[in-house]
Amino acid sequence: MPKRRQWDSKTKAKIVLEVIGGVLSPAEACRKYELAESVLARWKREFVEKADLVFGSDRSGEVGNREEIEDLQRIIGKQTVELEALKKGLGILRQKKGNRW
């Protein structure tokens, strides 16, 4: 049984754009690239369904990133305060050690 071909996303987009742009008919594209018509139809459908993602109309990921950045900044701030307290405590311990011995 022959192994299935793997198509990268750039090649799929190129083929679909050739068909949508009228450079090739669907039948010509299928012959040229040795594709089944059902595969080309699926690629076209997926391409059209996800076309809005190209222009960034969905900004929910951006909001999630902003929240993650704020969380990380809070953690960094907390760790900075803890580090300063530990340094101060270490300085006090060194002074007491110096005075006793």
Image (cartoon, rainbow, N blue to C red):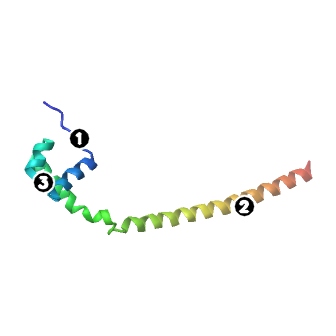
At horizontal 89% and vertical 51% (from top left) the residue drawn is 98
Q: Nearer the viewer, mark 2 or mark 1?
A: 1
In this view, the residue in front, 98 or 58, is 58
Alpha-carbon span between mark 2 and mark 1: 57 Å
Disc number for residue 75: none
Instruction: Kindly identify which residue carries mark 1.
Output: 6
Residue 71 located left or right of residue 79: left
- Indicate the amino acid at tag 1: Gln
Task: Residue 43 in the image: state x and y as whole percent.
Answer: 18, 53
Residues under numbered marks 3 and 1 in contact, where contact means CB atoms less than 8 Å apart: no
- Indicate the amino acid at tag 2: Ala
In the rendered image, the vertical position of residue 2 relative to residue 43, given as above or below: above
Number of marks drawn: 3
Q: Split into 4 quadrants, where in the image is the N terminus? A: top left
Q: Name the element at disc 1.
A: loop
Instruction: Kindly identify which residue carries mark 3.
Output: 41
